[in-house]
Image (cartoon, rainbow, N blue to C red):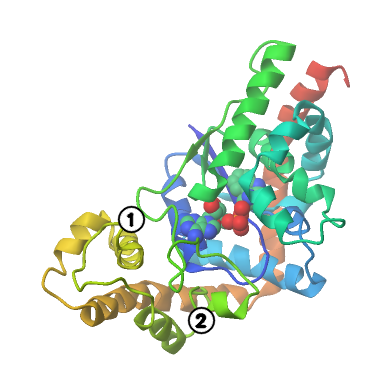
């Protein structure tokens, strides 16, 4: 049985990009694999964050997992900071990753560029090391993520390879990433050349569908999405990035390739097409939001779930950490 591992950072409001790139895909791994899905709360500290937002968003994420269909009887659901072993593994691994490698990471370059250059936290720089620790600690085979996290999983693969060749044998399992067939990179509705991301910028927020937006807001954002010149609903990301992004969203929700989705709208105008996209989003997000609200309203049940998840996750983590500590001579 393959082991599957993934996580989401509790940093503010989650987007339709997070949903299509991650949450939505996790349940399909829970029947034939052993899945470990967690809330990456330690990673949330890599950029300044209000403690109340971090605390509350942690419950949001686990409620989104449950609303997506993850079943705690099948999937180990847990909170990263409940697992002390991950801190130890991170402290070891940081010695096997080169500063040159970390400085090449796109996420670091983009996020650090927005900060005061004299106040870039080291945690932002070593973010991929903690992520590698998450991946290795449960002997993961498969890591489902959106396109923007691919580089980090590839670096983890390289670290594992380096570590194993230095100490001999398969001490750390080599991870592989998988991205969803459709929806691995959802773009902003107001600026389809940029990724849809959690953002503080008010202008940029118009292009972001948040999972907790109400129906009216969601429909309005989709109806005012930037479209391209011409009037044909066609999948052509270079010439028609706006329409192509909407086709990707539609296709991801309906389980079809965007090209195939475009055939449903031959001869129809942009307005009719956008309405169909808004309907598709609401058909899925409406019931999802209701399930979310039900789970989110009981924080003590969510805490119980975290405690049970931590026990199972630590059981898996301990032998792996032991193996690594033995290999390097710490045991
Ligand atoms: P986070 O919270 O930034 O992103 C969570 C997931 O959402 C995906 N995603 C998108 N997918 C499609 N289109 C978009 N516009 C979009 N925006 C975000 C991300 O690719 C990601 O899969 N570093 C991870 C958290 C983490 C992790 C791990 C993941 C920590 N340790 C170990 C896997 C394995 C992250 O960026 O989360």
For residue 213, the mark is: 2
Q: Position of residue 43 (x, y in %)?
A: 73, 53
Residue position marked by numbered label 1 in the rendering: 238
Tag of residue 134: none
- Mark 1 near ligand 1 (CB under 8 Å)? no
Element class at badge 1? loop
Residue 18 placed where, x, y %? 52, 61
Report the side of 288 relative to 262 (left or right).
right
State the separation of the CA atoms marked 1 and 2. 29 Å
Q: Is residue 312 above or below residue 224?
A: above
Q: Residues within 10 Å of mark 1 (few under 14, many from 20)?
A: few
Residue found at the very far top of the displayed protein: 168
Q: Residues within 10 Å of mark 2 (few under 14, many from 20)?
A: some
Find numbered disc 2 in the image and state the secondary structure of the residue it sits on: loop
Q: Can residue 19 be seen at all in this image of the molecule? A: yes
Residue 77 visible in the picture: no
Mark in front: 1 vs 2: 1
Q: Nearer the viewer, residue 7 or 292?
A: 7
Q: Nearer the viewer, residue 242 or 247?
A: 242
Image coordinates of residue 224 in percent, x first then y, are 38, 82
Residue at 50% across / 61% down in the picture? 195
Residue placed at 81% from the left, 61% from the top? 116
In this picture, is 141 found above or below 215? above
Which image quarter: residue 36?
top right
Name of the residue lying farthest toward the bottom: 216
- The quadrant of the picture occupied by the C terminus is top right
């Amino acid at each position: 049985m393959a082991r599957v591992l993934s996580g989401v950072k509790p940093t503010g409001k989650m987007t339709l990009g997070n949903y299509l790139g991650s949450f939505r895909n996790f349940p399909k791994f829970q029947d034939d694999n052993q899945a470990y899905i967690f809330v990456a709360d330690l990673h949330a500290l890599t950029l300044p964050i209000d403690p109340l937002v971090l605390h509350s968003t942690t419950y949001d994420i686990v409620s989104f997992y449950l609303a997506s269909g993850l079943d705690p009887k099948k999937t180990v659901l847990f909170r990263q900071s409940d697992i002390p072993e991950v801190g130890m593994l991170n402290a070891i691994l940081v010695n096997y990753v080169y500063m040159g490698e970390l400085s090449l990471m796109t996420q670091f370059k983009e996020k650090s560029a927005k900060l005061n250059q004299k106040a870039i936290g080291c945690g932002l720089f070593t973010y991929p090391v903690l992520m590698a620790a998450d991946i290795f600690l449960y002997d993961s085979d498969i890591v489902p993520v959106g396109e923007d996290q691919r580089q980090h999983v590839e670096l983890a693969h390289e670290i594992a390879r380096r570590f194993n060749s230095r100490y001999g044998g398969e001490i750390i399992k080599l991870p592989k990433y998988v991205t969803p067939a459709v929806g691995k990179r959802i773009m902003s509705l107001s600026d389809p050349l940029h990724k849809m991301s959690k953002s503080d910028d008010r202008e940029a927020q118009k292009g972001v569908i948040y999972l907790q937006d109400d129906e009216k807001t969601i429909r309005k954002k989709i109806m005012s999405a930037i479209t391209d010149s011409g009037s044909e609903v066609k999948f052509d990301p270079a010439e028609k990035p706006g329409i192509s992004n909407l086709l990707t969203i539609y296709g991801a929700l309906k389980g079809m390739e965007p090209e195939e989705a475009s055939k449903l709208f031959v001869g129809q105008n942009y307005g009719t097409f956008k309405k169909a996209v808004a309907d598709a989003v609401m058909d899925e997000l409406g019931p999802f939001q209701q399930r979310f609200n039900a789970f989110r309203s009981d924080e003590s049940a969510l805490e119980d779930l975290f405690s049970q998840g931590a026990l199972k996750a630590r059981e898996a983590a301990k032998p792996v950490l032991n193996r690594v500590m033995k290999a390097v001579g710490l045991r």
